[in-house]
Amino acid sequence: MAASCSGHSAMLHKCVRFKSLCNVHLCSGVFIRRIWTSRSKCQLQPKLQSKSSPQMVGVVALEIHAQIQATSKLFSSSRVGFSAPPNSHVSFFDASLPGTLPVLNRRCVEAAVMTGLALNCKINTKSLFDRKHYFYSDLPAGYQITQQRLPIAVSGSLSYSYLGGKKRSEVMMKSVRVRQIQLEQDSGKSLHDDQRSRTLIDLNRAGVGLMEVVMEPDMCCGEEAAAAVRELQLILQTLGTCQGNMAEGQLRVDANVSVHHPGEPLGIRTEVKNINSARFVARAIDYEIQRQFEVLESGGTVLNETRSFDSKTGTTVPMRDKEGLQDYRFMPEPNLPPLFVYEGVASVPDGIDPAQAVVIDRLKAQLPELPGVKRTRLMEEYGILPEHSFTLVNENGLMEFFERVVQKTKTEPRKLIGWVIKELIGNLNLQNLKVTQSPVSPEALAQLLNLLESGFISSSAAKVVFQEMWKAPEKGVEQLVKELDLELISDREELVKICQRVLEAHPDLVQVIRGGNKKVLNKLMGSVQKESKGRADPVQLRKILEEMTS
Amino acid sequence: MLGLSIKEVSAALREGKLSATELCRKCLQRIRKTRHLNAYITVTEELAMKQAQEADNRLLRGEALGPLDGIPFSMKDNFCTERVETTCASRMLRGYFPPFNATVVQKLLDQGAVLMGKTNMDEFAMGSGSTDGAFGPVRNPWSYSSPYRTLSPGTDLDFDWSITGGSSGGSAAAVASLSSFLALGSDTGGSTRNPGSLCGVVALKPSYGLLSRHGLIPLVNSMDVPGIMSRSVYDTAIALDVLQGRDVNDSTTVHVPDSPAPLPQEFDIRDLCVGVPKEYHAPGLSADTLAQWTRVASLFERAGARVHEVSLPHTQYSIVCYHVLCCCEVASNMARFDGLQYGHRSAVESSTEAMYATTRHEGFNDVVRRRVLSGNYFLLKQNYERYFVKAQQIRRLITEDFRRVFSSGVDVLLTPTTLSDAATYSDFIEEDNRTRSAQDDVFTQPANLAGLPAITVPTSLSARGLPIGLQLIGQHLQDRKLLAAAHWMEQQLDFPRIRLDEEDDPQETKSGWNRERERTSVA
């Protein structure tokens, strides 16, 4: 069993937090050790041990609604736009005026097919639309058009990985089955004004195309679920089928959470909604698993209910609606004929313009390099560490930045990666900037690294120059080096002078070296660099110091 | 003038013998004189006069848009008309002015046709009598005509007029009473053909997918089709030519090739094979209707057509199957009427749910509410398999019945349209809406389940002096062949023109009686 115990401290920390939040003493009942779950091992699996039963584990499935990146809605020509004035993007169909009919947006179908392909799904060349009924003020037709019976894509999988292990640098590879991807309409938004007891409705979002990605209960904890969500987010962004901004609701996660004893049937599940960041996915699920442990431990039963995650308190609370009891009275959507997509141009029947048809082969050819493939390639091509491949791929535009620097320098990619991850990302994060907003261009960084590589400046000097480049990107690298007087001192006489001064100040160290402990030479090296502001050429310097202390 | 066919009046307009405004004014007068029929919910007088004036301008310049330019027509009140009230004869939509035209409305307007008004109907097209609308029942023009008055003495017309059939009774009455040359109805289970037959007009239910439903407020989306009512098969063919074809706004429409003429040029009755389904000898079929059915079948036979008895064994299940599917779609389609965005909104504001409930209770009549309730019951998870799925299976069997018969070489099926002539209002309302719909749609409804084109052609007057029609059912998308057969049939029948008491032009009516029916060069 390869699962390590590295999650202990994090878990215990969580327990403490749970305890303080719930005011229930249960940490004594919780301990962590390596376990197998029904499908996978999870390091951070919260679990409960009681005398009567063996440990229980959490089971997590996800339903993810991804807003399709398209200029118009799923069944109407209204524009799609976040933060537009209320009710400014509403067609007669979106407002469900009687007599209006849905007209399917091909772009949305293509997005779903591409996503299906990226998630290793079987694409159904024939799929169907259904109506799902419920009364709600922001659902003007009284039903949502979705794909309940025969969705566009089925039976896929999502491989995701996260960093685990002792130093959180070990790549944990996981996979979750994707049951289906279905096309459906988004609802509008209701704004309840309790004080004046009225509800304001904005239908801009009503009818926007969604892909609902349904994942099987193959995850066991918040961290796994969050990692799966992040990976999906990245895939969708890479494909351009969804912008994936969770805060803007472009990607919405509902988690189905239950607990059971491994090997036994799944427990009663709750559905946790309103999770609007990947971090909260982890928190909400872990909280919910823990809560269900407690309920069962205290002899209670878990209710099949919808719960809402409150990010302020980090808890889940039951929602007031009657979702659990609702019968959606599904019915085939009679206004939309079956949706046909075709394997290849050759299979498009006569009478249908192949240019207007959705052709799987054509979309397959357009698939960009997916994150998983990118990471493997980066590791193989540049010999970088897995965790670095993660950072490069997960940060939008960073991989491109990195590869451009690689092209322009002789510096080894393995050395270069530190600059990208530490200096670049560090600075970006400080100012909350995106990679594309970096004041230092890949070319400028490459120039700097070339100076370093050729021994013109020391690495510590290079770091100083980098900071200056950040502040004054308009100045050239060489200009900055000159202005800051950071060129490497390779003049032997000058170096000897500095060494002389240092040796005089540390007679004791000289004694030790002469006594045979050559390691102490490094200390002297450090002192000299301090004196020279890091400008001494380290190779020459070592030679001089060795001579002078021999 | 009002009794002319579209073909004739269109020619008169082009030749300048008649102006569109004059024609329009005559129709408006006729509407006023026949107000007791309650055929119209809204009369668009101003708009009509404006459109007629525009048509005249074109006609004067010799730039007529087509055969319908300047022709008065009316629309059933479940077709959306831009800025013209569209009620579906329901309190729910009273005061609703749609912001767009239904595709079929737009197509007629684009051809220069003149909209006279919106016609009365059963609420949301649920009914077979045009007796269950929020604006009161429609009266059959034939109950005011001389044959009925002579043959059915003693009937008090203030109380015992006969119904039009439904649900497009207003449209049928408008065409029959000569206030519109053309009217559109909708046909879900027979709603165009049933009143067409009872009011003695030609009524076509085209193949499903041939005419756009965009802007038709739905009853059952998978069966609804706009229906065409006029006074001759040729006129119907002209309208179909204009109205048919793919509409980007309705994904269920199909493309049809352009046709050189409204009716096929080549038609030989001796090439026709007519099927007579034995299952259509239904209980309750009147002796009059049966006699006409037999007579017309032998007319075909004598002219050289092959006439066979055929079997459609699942016909008997069609009504119950229709009932289930209809209720389900009704429950779904009516869900949007919640009072929030348009239509009636209840004054109750204690909660959103209470507002929904009272709005819907106040807005819908018993018939609609009953179907919504049944539909929601059938769609419940635990019932879905037993009702909806079963009904769909039956639907496939019925479709298969037709397919089998047509693939055996039959071109058209000849059947009655209704069991008998129009009932009197007092008789009709003795049964409830559901019973009536089940009885009255028995011959018309299977064509809707199978999506087939079907047409009723007025055949003769009954012993009571009321119209009887017979139906021809064709193969899917073989609407032109169906029309050709119907046209031939129409030529053989000497169905009398209506004669109303208050004819505004007795001279014309008289000549109309003697006018030889239009005969075109068919074999």
Image (cartoon, rainbow, N blue to C red):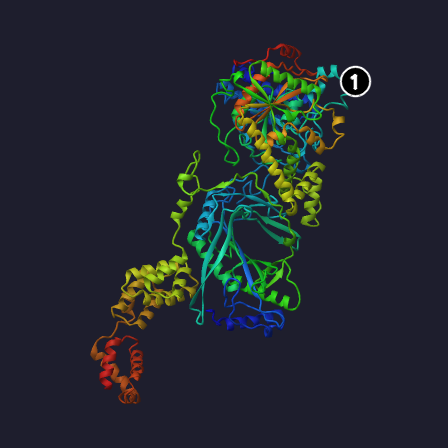
Q: Chain of mark 1?
A: B
Crowdedness near tag 1: few (<14), some (14–19) or many (≥20) residues, C-alpha within 10 Å: few
Residue under label 1, please give it: B154
Q: Closest to the observer: A333 or B336?
A: A333
Instruction: Name the amino acid, label 1.
Output: Gly
Q: Residue A242, how many percent across, how many down? A: 47, 52
| Residue at x 59% of width, y 10% of height | B516
Q: Residue A26, how many percent across, how many down? A: 61, 72
**Residue B1 shows in this picture:** no
Q: Secondary structure at mark 1?
A: loop
Q: Residue A123, how many percent across, how many down? A: 46, 47
Q: Residue B149, how many percent across, how many down? A: 74, 16
- Return the residue found at the far right: B154
Q: Closest to the observer: B141 or B286?
A: B286
Please determine whether, in this image, residue A188 is positioned above or below residue A354: below
Q: Closest to the observer: B371 or B1?
A: B371
Q: Quadrant of the C terminus of chain A?
A: bottom left
Quadrant assignment, res A404: bottom left
Please determine whether, in this image, residue A268 is positioned above or below residue B425: below
Q: Closest to the observer: B157 or A367?
A: A367
Quadrant assignment, res B125: top right
Residue B341 relative to residue A216: left or right? right
Please determine whether, in this image, residue B103 is positioned above or below residue B299: below
**Residue A120 shows in this picture:** yes
